[in-house]
Image (tube, rainbow, N blue to C red):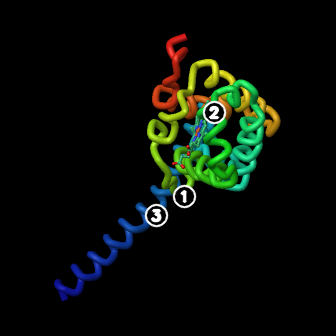
Amino acid sequence: MVAQRSFVSSIAITLAVMLVAAIAVPVRGEDQTRAKSGTGQTQAEKSLYDRLGGVYAIASVVDDFIERLLVNDVLNANPAIKEARARVPKAGLKYSVTSLVCQVTGGPEKYTGRNMKEAHKHLNITQKEWAAMVADFQKTLDAFKVPEHEQKELIGIVESTKGDIVVGADSKK
Ligand code: HEM
């Protein structure tokens, strides 16, 4: 009889614990959401990849950006860049850059190409050429009406690669 009562009470305790846990979880979640929206950071819960619209949106932005770079006179005046342009199919370059951007912004795609230093070291890219590339990137971001906050994050990602990419003669200017 005693054993039966303690069995019954242990079931009652287990049920009570489960009930408290079931109530506590949503309440905690609600508090977190409120705290974040109070500071205006709810959007930060989404990855940059999701905020940009995923792989199709990113591929479209990369497509426009690379088309601009291909006809950029400052870049084409560099014989090493011009030679690579003629050798490397643009569809492949767009694919590589898209997968890299998807990966670093939090998407499921995987970049399998070379690191930025290896991919660009033979191109002798200068500060002037870098600035020409950034100006084209800005035109693309504006054409796609990418919001300012996301633009800043993307430009920050691009800028983080500069030390590996800019090696040409005027790179200190
Ligand atoms: C002035 C700036 C840049 C120029 C002129 C440039 C040009 C090029 C060229 C010509 C190639 C093909 C090289 C070859 O295969 O011989 C290449 C490859 C590549 N670039 Fe750039 N690039 C620049 C900046 C960037 C930036 C900022 C990124 C990304 C943040 C980037 C991402 C890539 C990727 C992912 C590849 C492919 C690497 C591989 O397939 O192994 N590039 N770039």
Task: Identify the element where label 3 is drawn.
Answer: helix
Coordinates of residue 22 in the picture (x, y in percent)? 46, 64
Q: CB at mark 2 closer than 8 A to ligand 1? A: no
User: What's the residue at 63%, 33% (across, down)?
Assistant: 40
Could you say which is closer to the camera, residue 65 or residue 151? 65
In this figure, which residue is indicated by the disc labeled 1? 108
Q: Which residue is mark 3?
A: 22
Inspect this view and state whether residue 89 appears. Answer: yes
Label 2 crowding class (10 Å Cα cut-off): few <14, some 14-19, many 20+? few
Residue 108 is drawn in which quadrant?
Answer: bottom right
Q: Residue furthest top?
A: 173
SS class, disc 2: loop
Which residue is found at the position 52% from the left and 17% from the top?
169
Residue at coordinates 46% horizontally, 30% vertically from top-left? 164
Mark 1 residue type: Pro
Q: Quadrant of residue 173?
A: top right
Does residue 48 appear to the left or right of 121 in the view shown? right
From the viewer's perspective, is 45 left or right of 10? Answer: right
Residue type, numbered disc 2: Gly
Kindly state the secondary structure of the residue where label 1 is placed. loop
